[in-house]
Amino acid sequence: MRRLIILCALAVVVATSSRPVGCAEPPAVDRLLTNSTALYGEFSRPQELIDLVLSDKARQLADQFPAVAKYWESKDFRTLKTVVEVLERRLGVEWRTAIETLTAGGVTAAFDTSEQAAFLFVRSGDAELLAKLHDALVEMTEADAENKGRESPIKSEDYRGFTGWTFGKNEAHVLLGDLLVVSNKAEALKGVADRYLAAAENDAKESDEKSASLADDAVYRAARKHAAGNDAGFAFVRLAPLRLLAGMAKALGQKSNNALLELLLGGALDAVSQADYLAATLQLNEQGLRFAAHLPRDRAKVAPTRTWFFADKPNQSAEIALDVPGTIATLTAHRDVGGMWQARSDLFDEQTNVGFTKADTNLGLYFSGKDFGSQVLGELEPKWRIIAAERKFGVDGEPTPALKLPSFAVVWELKHPLEFAPHLQLAFQNVVGLTNVDGAQKGRAQLLLKSEQRGDAEIHYGTYLRVGETDQDNAPVQFNFRPACARVGKHFIVGSHVDLVRTLADQLGKQPSTPTTSDSFALEIRAQELATILAANRPLIVGRRMLAAGGDKPAAEGQLELGLEALRLFEDAGIRLIDGADSLTLELRLQTASN
């Protein structure tokens, strides 16, 4: 019971806001911490999160999860409900109003490396309500201990006019006016109280003396510049001490064994090895949320092995995404893959380089023995565009596959399109030929190569010939594909289906030039279209879930509907790595559906 009461207290008491005694304005939390604080995070507008978590839509969605529905019927929930009802009577306020009031000023968490102390700061919109809640929790905990014949776990100590409390081992807290401060170190709270009083005295005397607080730290102030006035949250990580811990510096200096990770985040890892801090910001509103992590970066100090990752100048990175009807997802990126391939001996460990060497030899065969790194990848501009889109099934007499997949395509920009495009077309034909050889051995349908001229685009594509009787409405998976390639000016397209390649060729033919952006890469996913393609595969998905659920069809259908309903709550989602003039920013965005 005592543990449950403490958990209830932590769930309810998470805030900061009114005016402390002896101070014209309450001191900001960053003035109560020392400049050896390595981790700092604040959530300044918890009301927005409360509204989101407690909304009818969120509750309806949560109720569909069996574990949640089970918890509502559990003994633990009934006990928690009883405790909350007791607190409501003691405080004279309904629980949701209490939470909103007690969290009106925000929540801050921090860690001080010099004291090895963790802190939680909670600023209430009503100091009297905060004190009243604390008194109620103290009385309830002591009564529970007495009823069970145990010694009360609560202890207190006075310090400079404040009273510090503990509800158990490795927990101590103090009320500083409207501010609740919780820590794992009781002695650390005395330092907070000292700085709190010093801030009050400095305000009264209008002193110009600078204390050694986090707010006065140059690195912290630089990180704080990334925050905007409408941000709901801000976080700061001091990287220098972290690089000394757990061998982080050594790990960053080691050669990689993951080519995909290097391709996606090699430049960010390079920045982490040099940056003083990581700053993060959070925006939250009715339309969704935006989380961004910022790393300072000096473009002149990029490691020679990582120059392939970055554009020469800001705003000259990835091109804008292609957009066609039924777009499900787009990925744009600036990556000089040929440059990474050439630097592989310095970037990757021995075992990974063995794999690169094998790939170099095998892939070169598709290009008449050309060196894959310099003579193939080296012919591609570092501007990649990938798109996935819905496609129509059952057109042109094509069989409809049982498993319905979206179409996808990649678009490259060529340095020497007239000279190199024929080699890409030849490689496409080689792949089709090898696919046919393998298919013939395994009794699968064969691809018949065709070509057409579409405006300025020369399109080559393969279409599957049927083998025996093919179910028109339940065809094999290969009937999702009519692989195709096309050259349009300086662009070359390779796609899973000729319809998408035709659409992209038409679009590119109308664009003499494509604006670039500051995105090192950008992935956009449209939730509604993704839900549509999943719903089109309902029988297969339900069938697979039935196998996992022991033949329970209603349960399988319910799980699918839950997933689709969750997707339909959102409009789209995105992740971007922004290559700014003096920083790298990783941005996550989630937009809710309008209805």
Image (cartoon, rainbow, N blue to C red):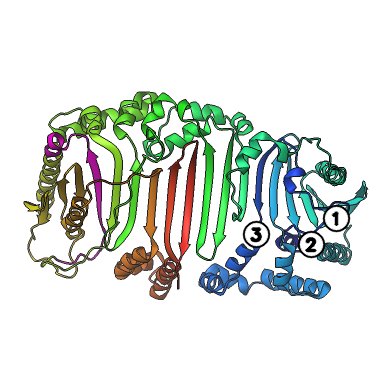
In this view, the residue in front, 44 or 55, is: 44
Q: Of discs 1 and 3, which sits in the foreground?
A: 3
Q: Amino acid at mark 3?
A: Arg
Q: Amino acid at mark 1?
A: Pro
> What percent of the width, then of the height, locates residue 301?
47, 26
Residue located at (80% from left, 49% from top): 169
- 522 lies left or right of 279: left
Q: Is residue 308 magenta?
A: no
Q: Of discs 3 and 2, which sits in the foreground?
A: 3
Res. 79 visible in picture: no
Mark 3 is surrounded, within 10 Å at the Cα level, by few (under 14), some (14 to 19) or many (20 or more) other residues, namely many
Q: Which mark is residue 45?
A: 3
Q: Name the residue carrying label 2.
A: 2
Mark 2 is surrounded, within 10 Å at the Cα level, by few (under 14), some (14 to 19) or many (20 or more) other residues, namely some
User: Which segment is the magenta one?
Assistant: 399-422
> What percent of the width, then of the height, locates residue 486?
15, 48
Q: Earlier in the sequence, mark 1 or mark 3?
A: 3
> What percent of the width, then of the height, locates residue 124?
76, 60
Residue located at (69% from left, 49% from top): 109
For the C terminus, give its image quadrant. Answer: bottom left
Mark 1 is surrounded, within 10 Å at the Cα level, by few (under 14), some (14 to 19) or many (20 or more) other residues, namely some
Q: Earlier in the sequence, mark 3 or mark 2?
A: 2
